[in-house]
Amino acid sequence: MDAQVQANRRAQIIFAAREVFACEGYSKASIKKIATKANLNSPALIYWYFDNKADLFAAVLAEATLMLHEISLNNLIEDLAPQEALHFLAQRFFEIFECPANKRIFRILISESMNNAEVSDHFAETVILPLKNYLVPYFQQKIAVHLLRPHDPEISARAFVGMLMHYVFTDQTFPQLNASQPLPDVYIEEVIKIFMDGLQGENLSV
Amino acid sequence: MDAQVQANRRAQIIFAAREVFACEGYSKASIKKIATKANLNSPALIYWYFDNKADLFAAVLAEATLMLHEISLNNLIEDLAPQEALHFLAQRFFEIFECPANKRIFRILISESMNNAEVSDHFAETVILPLKNYLVPYFQQKIAVHLLRPHDPEISARAFVGMLMHYVFTDQTFPQLNASQPLPDVYIEEVIKIFMDGLQGENLSV
DNA sequence: GCATTATAATTGAACGTTCAATCAAGATTC
DNA sequence: GAATCTTGATTGAACGTTCAATTATAATGC
């Protein structure tokens, strides 16, 4: 077959593999199940396109375009005030995880990162570091011009990412609790308000 | 053997199982490896004390005493000002994850929650819900007496837990980044400051 | 335009290995 | 000697992977 057909088959297998890996985990996901999901008549066909199971798994991760690289390239944000910049970042972040394929990749990253150094590297490089490398310099600059009070931007960046990640994580992991899960937009708005203004009430003394 | 020896054997197996499950994941952790780790001469002995692999895994989770139940029982905190209450909670939280056994359980909970409903239930009931059930009513009360500004306590509770969890998560998952990871105490202090006062600087306008 | 050849893709059967689980037999304790 | 515990050997199923054989597609020669 020509290159296009080959590419299609590859994509078809990767697509199926992502699904199976995401809901079974790497170990429990068998080549047979992936082949079935991909409507192949034989699991052996997978070995025409991939060296082995680990290679297929790597291809699933490599094909994941979800990621947050682009955010840091977009330097339009540096001119925004903190509220707007954080809003922009948070919305981009949640947009990414609206896509079902990205949700599945997120599951894989969280789950397999604990037992697989390659996966945790990939997680760090495609999610954690881009966010950090975007936020820390931005915070530094805004501290310099007194739009933010003096503080360690490593910590605030981490805290902000934590608030976003925790939403996506609980959303994915505890469907039972989704009743009390506020909508993303509401959550974003309140979280940024907390981040900028805090929760302090009128009674400053106990 | 007597009951004590039996209890010891059980504990010995559970101890070994927790280690192996934590660093291999449920699927890759084999009964044979667990038996070896527990210094048993035969894997078959495990089946004297446990019905099967899943039963052993359940025992590992059930034996985990890490958890945050007790926090909500401790109602001494209601009288504390938000700063002190959050400080207390955060310190308890980090204390718990200083214990290596609890770190391992945390790894298991994060990793297996993605593919196993029982584990995610356990995670929710022993970590997520206790924190939520502790924070939300507390915030509600402090809003009522104007120590905190009016807001949705579900959101702030989630945000605060997110900031704590993200620290533990990154600490466990990305050892490469640990250079830039601030010490727990420093992180706690700054995060609570953000949570109460925000990051707003002197220049209120752009 | 048809026959021939080469290459790419697909298949089903089989391999060796590993796994959870079982079992019959032995050891220990009371 | 009965109950509790321990052991090494064993089982059958499932796994990733290989391979020889087969079909589909494209390329070439006439």
Image (tube, coloured by chain):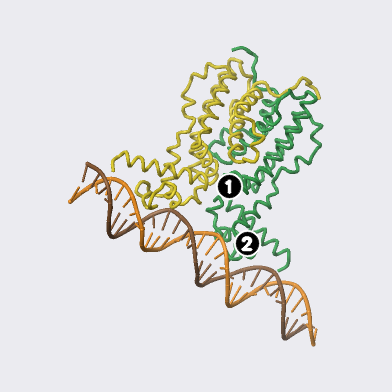
Chain colours: A green, B yellow, C brown, D orange
Height in image: B161 above or below B109?
above
Q: Are marks 2 and 1 in contact (CB under 8 Å)?
A: no
In-image side of A162 versus D10 (left or right): right
Please check whether the numbered discs 2 and 1 fall on a single chain: yes
The percent coordinates of residue A114 (x first, y second) are: 57, 44
Return the residue at label 2: A51
Q: Amino acid at mark 2?
A: Asp
Label disc, if present, on residue B9 of the rendered structure: none
The CA distance from mark 2 to mark 1 is 20 Å
Tell me the SS state at disc 1.
Answer: helix
Q: Earlier in the sequence, mark 2 or mark 1?
A: 2
The percent coordinates of residue A73 (x first, y second) are: 78, 41
Tell me the SS state at disc 2.
Answer: loop
In-image side of A168 versus B206 (left or right): left
Q: Chain of mark 1?
A: A
Q: Chain of mark 2?
A: A
